[in-house]
Image (tube, grey):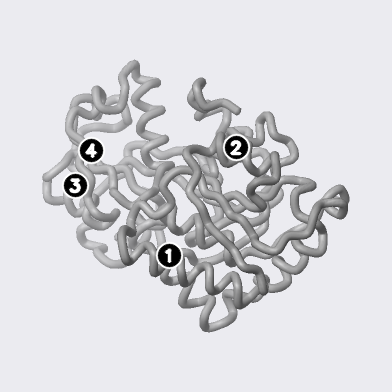
Amino acid sequence: MATFAATRAGVGRVSVVLACALLAAPGVPARAQQAKKIDVLRIGASGAIATDLSGTKEETAFEALRSFIKSETGFDNEIKRQKSWRELTDKMADGTLHLGVFQGYEFAWATEKRAALKPLALAVNVHVYRTAHLITRSDNEVTDFAGLQGKSLALPRVGQDHLRLFVERQSQLNGKELKTFFPKITSPENIEDALDDVVDGVVQAAVVDRAGLEAYKRRKPGRFNRLKEVARSQPLPPPLVAYYEGVLDQDTLKRFGDGLLNARRKEKGQKLLTLFRLTAFQTPPADFDRVLAGTRKAYPPPKSETP
């Protein structure tokens, strides 16, 4: 089995939102110089943002985020959920929203027909790219995804939508929908609980993120040694913040980037990172476009939601 290192639960959609507060803007397109300056920075995120926070805890987290953006950039700001990645993309294109927070695979879908949509920065949890890992007990005779048909699956309730994306697609490639392929799907609170359930025989498999699997190995090496991997996804893009060319003026983008570039080196920024379960922020690496293209090929968007 591959070797793994750190973090217990993966980044949920709330983690995605944090990225918009703590990332520096890379190169600013020339056409943005003619864009209108703003007084309030409007940020949108697709779907439900904080799947692992609710009620008072969620509002407290967002208030801390809005306060951080204000203190570091001087911008008043608002963060609003959108119905879907398609709606988010359209509102960025018409200038209703200045920045957008996407799941990585959603961004891959959106940019297929929206070339002016650009990545501002990636929200990283230990590793730049994400991978989903399908795990069973080491004494299980199953050796691949197909062998788990009809078995039970733990899918952690931590907002890591790429995990569901992976098992849904693999189920379809085996001629079934997810709920038919796995007739029993549980929703443990986090990755550690999901893996414990596999070790204890509560379920026969779990799908988990690389960073969470690494953390489990570090925290519980004896139990980790009772597990094995039977399938994994290709590298997938992480959650990210994007901008649309021409919507924000160059001065505004520069102001936003300069104000947030060193946030992780500040005490307040480190606390916010911890709150939203991120470890770093990074501009897209050289192979980012290749990973986006591979994601679109392996995981085509729902036909009804193609922009």
How packed is label 4: few (under 14 Cα within 10 Å), some, or many (20 or more)?
many
Residue matched to label 3: 198
Tell whether 188 sits left or right of 22: left
- SS at circle 4: strand
Residue matched to label 1: 277
Quadrant including the C terminus: top right
The residue at the point 77 percent across, 65 percent down is 254
The residue at the point 41 percent across, 35 percent down is 165
| Three-letter code for the amino acid on which mark 3 is drawn | Val
Task: Answer with the quarter of the image where residue 262 lies.
Answer: bottom right
| Three-letter code for the amino acid on which mark 4 is drawn | Leu
- SS at circle 2: helix
Q: From the top left corner, tell me how far across and down residue 110 is, in percent.
A: 61, 35
Q: Are marks 2 and 1 in contact (CB under 8 Å)?
A: no
Task: Answer with the quarter of the image where residue 3 lies.
Answer: bottom left
The residue at the point 20 percent across, 41 percent down is 186
Residue matched to label 2: 108
